Amino acid sequence: MRILQLSCFTLVVLFAARSFAVDLTADITDLQIRAGTSIDVTLQIDLRVSGSPQTSATLRVFQAVDQGQEQRICCDDQALQVYTGAGNRIQVPATVPSSARTVRFRALADPLLRVFETNEQNNSDSVDSQVAPDIAFVGVTPLIQPQINQFKISMSVINIGFLSARASRGRVLVDGQLKSSFDVPSLKGLGTRPANQTGLELTVSPVGAGPHSVRIDLDVDNQISESDEANNSAIRSVSITSQ
């Protein structure tokens, strides 16, 4: 069995006369994988209200696999008491087939429009993700150093998949020649920030004066079975000036 915890949704709803604010956010906090044919997910949803000591609200949660039709997985439209400050926390179980490529969860407050609000457009939030791990660059910035024949690369690598990515190795090529290798630690799944993202800084040398093409590759040993293998490279240009 594969166990994934998703926490937390925050939902914002506003009343006209009295402000009802349910602020919906999503955050995956933990991922445990066990042998099995499915991924067990626990969504933790926080409902909060402001402008009134308490109010009643209903909640629905939907799931869609591989961009298919949404299926309602919670709840039965029973009114929930939501209090200022403390809010209301709900845990919703879900199951995702391990063979799925993508999954989407959506939480919707006041689906029957029984609450008079100033803004009906901010009552929902969603989480979309690839199921398989997928590591990619967030940013790659060459940092030119005053020393001749050397420069640094600052980068961030993120796992944008639902499942964790094992540790892997990357490389740096300058003008097609291997200059450096580096390790990327294992990264948890989407939403487990900061655990699903890592920052790296590399020093590349020696490099002669003049313009150069720099290519950075991830998972060069194909250790990770990714949903997208096409986003594992970044190319930048640098120019080294002689002192």
Image (tube, rainbow, N blue to C red):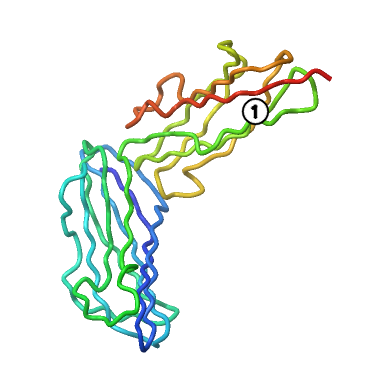
Residue designated by label 1: 202
Q: Quadrant of the N terminus?
A: top left
Residue 195: x %, y % from top left: 49, 45
| Residue 111 pos. (x, y %) | 21, 71
Q: Residue at x 28, y 62 (%)?
A: 107
Amino acid on which the number 1 mark rests in the picture: Leu
Q: Is residue 237 left or right of residue 167?
A: right
User: Dot 1: what SS?
Assistant: strand
Note whether 126 is above or below 177 in the view shown: below
Q: For this rendering, which residue is in front, 185 or 107? A: 107
Image location of residue 114, percent across then percent down: 22, 80
Compared with 113, 43 (above or below) is above
**Quadrant hosting residue 149:** top right
Q: From this view, report whether residue 17 is shown above or below residue 142.
A: below
Front residue of this view, candidates 131 and 231: 231
Q: How crowded is the residue under tag 1: few (<14 C-alpha within 10 Å), some, or many (20+)?
A: some
